Image: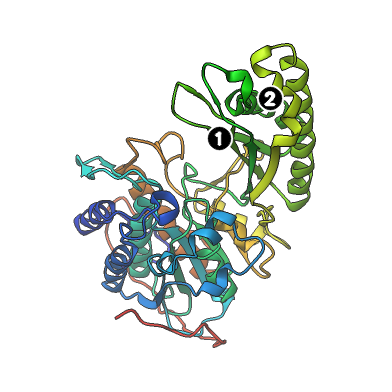
Amino acid sequence: MADPSRSPRARLTGEDHALLLRLLGIPTAGPLETGDTGTVRLWEAGRAYAAAARRFGMSVVRHAAPPGTVLLRDDVPLPVREAAEDPAFLVCQPSLVLRLGPPGLPREATVMFNVHLDTVAGWWPPSFDGARFRGRGAIDAKGPAVALLAGIRAARAAEPAVGGRVGVLVQAVAGEEGGAMGTFGTRPLVEQGLVGRLNVFCEPTGHRYLPRATAAMTARVRVRGEDAVDDRPEAGHNATVLLGFLGHHLATVLPGRVPGTRVCVAGLHTGERHNKVYGSGQLLLNLAYTDPECGRAAEAALRETLRDGLAAFRAGAHGHPGLARTAGDAEAITSLHWLKRGLPALGGPAGDPAWAERLLESCGLSRWPAEEPAFTCDAVWMSGVPGTYTAVLGPGGLDTNRAHAEGEYADLAELDRYAGEVARLLVAFARGGRAPRPPHPSGVPRTRPPESSTNDPSPHAPERQDT
C-alpha cells in the first residue's frame, strides 16, 4: 500500500488521450458563437465525459439543460436573451455535474472544480503527435477538463478520504463562451449550492492560482444615418468614417480615464461594398472591471469620452465637404447601447483566505502576481458566496496556447503537470492542509495507516441522473 505522506502519481493515460481527442472532435461551440443550434453537440460531449468519470467512481448529479427562467434577469446579456427566443437555444446547451463521494457531505468537506466544455467557433480535426494536442478547446478548456479527471482519479487512489469523508464536485458547464458569461451554465449551479469550501475554476493561468476574476460589460455605439452613392458622398452620412474616428478616440482616451478597467475596442461594421457610403453601422467595446464601483465609473467615463469624441469629430471634419453633413449631425445620429452590464466581479475571497492560500502554496502553487491583470471567466459567480474560497487555476496561457485562435494547442507535459496539481490539492485538503511529499524515488509502496471516516450530512441538491 502507498505511503499516505507521499504525493500521488498523476498522469494522463492512453484512455485519457483518447478521451481528449474524442472531445476535441465533437463541435461544442454554442449558438452565440455559430448562430446555429443544430451544430452544437454538448449533450454528446457531456455523456463522453461522464462515462470516463464513472469508470473511477464518480456519479452524475445532474445532466440537463437549464430552464428558461434563468434568463429572466436584468443582468443577462441582451444577445443571450434575444437568442433564447428560439426554444432550441437552451435545450442544446446542457451542463453536467459530477460527484465523488456520498450525497449530503457538507460544503466544508467538499472541493468543487468548474470547467467548461463549450468552445468558441472555429473547428478543425484534432491531432496528437505524442507531445502536443491540437484542436479547438485543447487548452480552453477540454484539455484541462481531461487532466482534471486524471487528477481526481489519482487523488482517490492515493487517499481514501477523497471520495469518503471529503467530496469532490465537478461542474462541466455550457455557456462560458460567446458572451454568455455563465448566466445559464455556472450561475444556476452555484445558486443551487453545488459548490465547495474550496472552488477551482479550470482556466489557463500558467499553473498559478488567481483568486480574482474581472467581469465584462459590452457597449455598442450605433450610428443611424442616411446612405449615399459613392459619386455623391456628401449627400449622406459616412458612418464608416465617424465610427472609425470614434474607435480610435475611445481606444486612446478611454483607458486613461478608468483606472482598473481594461478597454477593448472590438468589432466595427458598416458595410462591404466599395461603391456606396454607408450611413449606418456599429462599433462594439468590451470593458473589463475589477469591482462594481469600477464598473459604474467605467460606464460614466464611456459616456463622457463618447461625447468628447463626437465633439472632436465635428470640429475636425466640419471643413471637409464630403463629411460636412456627417459632422453636423454626428450627435443626432449616434447613440450608446448596453448589450451586457451589471455582472459581479470576483475581487477576492470574503473573510480570511489564509487557510486556502497556505493549502495551495503547500502544494507547490504560486499566486498570480498582484500587478498582473486578471481576466474574465465564470468564477465571478462565486463572488459573495459565504464560507468559500475560489481560485482560477489551469495549465497553459490564453495567449501563448492560442486560445480562441487558429492553432490552439495543449502540451501533454502541461496537462500531466496539472493533473498532479489537482491530485496534490485534493489529498492535502483531505488531510487537513498537509501537502503530500513528492513521490518516493524508489517507487516502493509503504503501509498506509487506517483512516477514520465521519460524515456530517447536510441538505444537498436533488440528484438527476443522466440515463
Tell me residue 69's x, y (percent).
56, 74
The first of marks 2 and 1 along the sequence is: 1
Q: Quadrant of the C terminus?
A: bottom left
Q: Of 406 and 359, which appears nearest the observer? A: 406
Compared across the picture, whether 57 is left or right of 361 comes to: left
- Residue position marked by numbered label 1 in the rendering: 266
- For the residue carrying disc 1, how many other residues have a C-alpha within 10 Å: few (<14), some (14-19), or many (20+)? few
What element does badge 1 sit on?
strand
Q: Residue at x 40, y 65 (%)?
A: 93
- Residue position marked by numbered label 2 in the rendering: 326
| Amino acid type of the residue that numbered disc 2 sits on in the rendered structure | Thr
Would you place residue 273 above or below residue 17 in this image? above
Compared across the picture, whether 287 is left or right of 149 comes to: right
Tell me residue 198's x, y (percent).
56, 65
Compared across the picture, whether 55 is left or right of 191 comes to: left
Q: Residue at x 42, y 49 (%)?
A: 33
Q: Quadrant of the N terminus?
A: bottom left
In the rendered structure, find residue 321 and report the number of the disc placed on it. none
Tell me residue 127's x, y (percent).
21, 43
Compared across the picture, whether 271 is left or right of 215 comes to: left
Question: Can you tell which of label 2 and label 1 is closer to the viewer?
Answer: 2
Would you place residue 222 above or below residue 244 in this image? below
- Res. 313 image quadrant: top right
Real-space CA distance between mark 2 and mark 1, rounded to the nearest whole angstrom? 23 Å
What element does badge 2 sit on?
helix
Would you place residue 459 above or below residue 344 in this image? below
Q: Residue at x 30, y 54 (%)?
A: 27
